[in-house]
Amino acid sequence: MISVEEASAALLALVSRLPVERVPLRAARGRVLSGPVRARHAQPSFAASAMDGYAIAVADPVPGQRFRIKGESAAGHPFTGRCDGDGAIRIFTGAPVPEGAVRVIIQEDVTRDGDVIVLTDTVGSGTHIRPEGGDFDAGATHDPQRPLGSRDIALLAAMGHGKLSVIRRPEVAIIMTGDELRPPGTLLATGQIAASNGYGLAAMLEDAGAQVRLLPIAADTPESLGQALDLAAGADLVLTIGGASVGDHDLVAATAGAAGLELSFHKVAMRPGKPLLAGKLKGSTLVGLPGNPVSSMVCGLIFILPLLRSMLGLPPGVPRRVVPLAVGIGPNGPREHYMRATLRDGRAQPHARQDSSLLSILADADVLLVRPPRDPERGPGDPVDVIDLPR
Ligand SMILES: Nc1nc2c(c(=O)[nH]1)N[C@H]1C(S)=C(S)[C@@H](COP(=O)(O)OP(=O)(O)OC[C@H]3O[C@@H](n4cnc5c(N)ncnc54)[C@H](O)[C@@H]3O)O[C@H]1N2
Ligand code: MOO
C-alpha cells in the first residue's frame, strides 16, 4: 500500500492545467482567473468628495468665516472652474473636488444665507476628500487564487473589466455504484439506503469551481457500470463511488480495467479511504472512491479538491495548522488516520466514534485531525495537525 503523500503525487501527475476562456463579468462568479488582473484606471480616477457640503480653498478656516458660493459639483457633473480665495463650491458625495479646493466642510457645519455660508464653531479637521487612487491606482493587480466570490467581482468591476480570462471549469462525472442505493427522497425497501455521498461530493466540487454531472446510479454488474463509464466519457475527471474494495460485488477495478484503465495505484495507507484507486481511462482521469460515505467525502477533500485546484492552476496543497489536543488519545495503527474532531476553545476533541459510515459526525465536525501512521499515544495539550473542513 502506498502512503497518502505518494498517492497525492501520483494523482497530481495525472492532470494538467486546463485552457483559458473569456467570460462576461456576470458569469465569472465561482470561476478562477487565469492570472493577475490589472486595474484599467485608478479608483477614484479623480479626487472626490466623501460628504455633502461645501468645497473651499482654505486649509484652516475659523468659526464665523464667510464664503461665497460660486458653483456646484455633483456626482457625474463636475464643476469646471477653480475654487479660490473666499469662494466655495456646493459639492455632493462622490462629486469631483474642483481645482484649488483643499477641503470639504460638511453642510451640518455651516449656516447658509443665499449665496453665502458662515462656518459654525463645530468645524472639524477632516478634509472629507477621497484622493485620486485612494482605493487603487491604475495598473494595480488582483489575483485572489481562489474561485471568485462577490467581493472579488465587485473589485474587478471597479477595476473596469466587463470580461475576464478564466480557466475552463473542470468537468467532473460522478458515478455512484451499488444495488442497495436509491435516490434521496424515494421510499426504501429492506436492505436499501439513500445514496448520499455523490450529492455531497458534487456540492463540494461545485464550491471549488467544477462543473459536475451526477450520473444515474449504476447497479453492481459490469454491464451497468460499463454503461455509466460510457456516459462519463469526455469528462476531465470521472469519479466512481463504491465497489472499490475486495468484495465479490466490488467491480470498479475490474470493469474499468476491461474498459482500458491504465491503473496508477490501488489502495492507500489511510483511514478512512483505504480502497482508493486511480488511473487514466480514455483521456479522462478516473478516481475510484470507497463507498463508505465518510471515506468518499474525506478522499474528496484530501485528493479530489487538490486535483481540481491543479487543473485550475491553483496551488494544490491541503493547508494544515497545529492545535493542542483537548484529550489524550491512544497510539495510531499503520494507516494515516483522518479523525473527525470538534474545536473546543481552540483545542481538538476527536469524536469517540470514527466509523466511516457516520455522516452525522462528519456534519458536526469542525476539522479533520490528522495522525501519522504509528503515531504514539498523545496526551491533552499535545500539538496535532488539523485540516479545517469546508462548510
Ligand atoms: N474484507 C475486506 N472488506 C473491506 C475492506 C477490506 O480491506 N477488506 N475495506 C473496507 C473499507 S476500509 C472500506 S472504505 C469499504 C469500501 O468498500 P467499497 O468501496 O467497495 O464500497 P461498497 O462496499 O460499495 O460500500 C461500502 C458502504 O458504503 C455504502 N455506500 C456505497 N455507496 C454509497 C453512496 N453513494 N451513498 C451512501 N452510501 C454508500 C454501501 O451501502 C456500504 O454500506 O470496504 C470495507 N470492506
Ligand atoms: O478506509 Mo475505509 O474508507 O476505513 O472506511
Image (tube, rainbow, N blue to C red):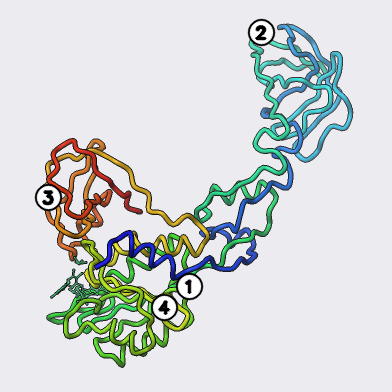
- The answer to whether residue 165 is left or right of residue 340 is right
Q: CA distance from mark 2 to mark 4?
A: 78 Å
Measure the alpha-carbon separation of dots 4 and 3: 37 Å
Which residue carries the number 2 mark? 121
Q: To which residue does mark 1 refer? A: 171
Confirm or reject: label 1 Cβ below 8 Å from ligand 1. Answer: no
- Label 2 with label 4: CB-CB less than 8 Å: no
**Numbered tag placed on residue 280 in the rendering:** 4
**Rendered residue at 31%/75% (across/down):** 288
How far is the residue under mark 3 from the one under mark 2? 74 Å
Q: Closest to the observer: 113 or 262?
A: 262
Query: Where is residue 151 drawn, in percent x and y?
Result: 54, 47
Q: Residue furthest bottom?
A: 223
The first of marks 2 and 4 along the sequence is: 2
Query: Disc 3 marks which residue?
Result: 331
Residue name at image x 47 percent, y 54 percent: 315
